[in-house]
Every structure is written in structure tokens, then in C-alpha cells.
Amino acid sequence: MFDTMTLVKAGGGVCGALLIFLFGNWAAESIYGFGEGGGEEATQAYSIVVADAGATTGTTSDADPAYADVSAAADAAAGEKTFGKCKACHKIDGSNGTGPHLNGVVGRPRGSVDGFAYSAGMLSKKGDPWTPDLIYVFLKSPKAYVPGTKMSFAGLAKPEDRANVIAYLETLK
């Protein structure tokens, strides 16, 4: 049943399949530039310009209501639920995690938690207190507010979510 000719045919089939895959890989590298040395250098196809939302002044854009306008309706219980997104890095038991602990953060000087290695961007703002207005702007887009921050969180787009989180943070002492 298995003679020499059958083994030669099976071996030839495997080698033929490998050659087809190798040819396909070579063609894809030539056309699309995959792999090392193939194609052109990768370049950004287009960029999206995003308006600065008051990154240094603590103000918000016209499309975003001011903190004072949304703070009256803020709900600390809803903020505690939204804070679940923050728990991956921040603790509320007085110990530091990936980020500094957030006990008493409202009113606390920025960059002042002992034992936490802040980024150079955050250290440039050291000393000024975290007011609810500043936290509101920061939570919208941390990287826009503090360029060079180590905080990788994209931010909270909804003003209500930010106000709710601030109301919750104000309960933590």
C-alpha cells in the first residue's frame, strides 16, 4: 500500500505547499512592505487635529460645560461606579498602586504623595492644589492636560461622569 512512489508524491506535495507559502510571503513583502527591509518606511497616512481643551488653564471648550454647571447634579454613588475604571491603577486605601492613592486628592497639592515617582510632566505642576475644576479638566484628557504624564488612561468624555467621580473623590479623606 505504501510504496516508494506514494512517499515521493507525499513529500513532493509538502514541498510544493511550502514553496507556495514562501512565494506568497515574498509577494506580500514586495507589494505591502511587510517584514524587515521590505517596502518603504512606514509613514502616518493622516493626522487628526484635536482642539486643546484648556490643557494648561483649567478651562473647558465651548462644547464642554464648565464644572460649576454640572457639579450641582453630581452623584457620588454614580461616581463610585465610574471610579471602577480608575481602580486598575489607583487605590483608595492610602497605599500607592501604579498611580498614586486618591485619598484626599481634592484640595491636595499636585505631585505631593510621598513615595510615588511622578512623571516630569506632573512634577512641572507640583504644588498647585487639585481643585474640582482642575480635576474635571484633567479627567477629560490626562495626556492633553499634562503632556508627558505616565497616566495611560484616555479620559472620561462625559461631563456628568467626571462630575460624579469628583463628587465621589470628595468623600474620600
Image (spheres, rainbow, N blue to C red):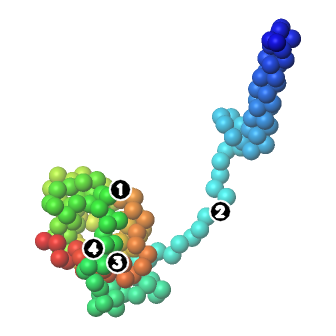
Residue at the front extreme? 1
Q: Earlier in the sequence, mark 3 or mark 4?
A: 4
Numbered badge on residue 163 = none
Give how far apart the Cα atoms at labels 1 and 3 are: 20 Å
Distance from Cα at disc 2 to Cα at disc 3: 31 Å
The residue that label 4 is drawn on is 80
* Helix, strand or loop under label 4: helix
Q: Position of residue 8 (x, y in %)?
A: 83, 13
Disc 3 marks which amino acid?
Answer: Arg
Q: Secondary structure at mark 2?
A: loop
Res 56 seen here:
no
Q: Position of residue 1 (x, y in %)?
A: 82, 12
- Mark closer to the observer (3, 4): 4
Residues tagged 4 and 1 counted as in contact (Cβ below 8 A): no
Give left or right: position of 100 versus 10: left
Sequence order check: which comes first, mark 4 or mark 2? 2
Do callouts 2 and 3 mark residues in contact (Cβ within 8 Å)? no
**First of labels 1, 2 by sequence position:** 2
Q: Nearer the viewer, residue 3 or 62?
A: 3
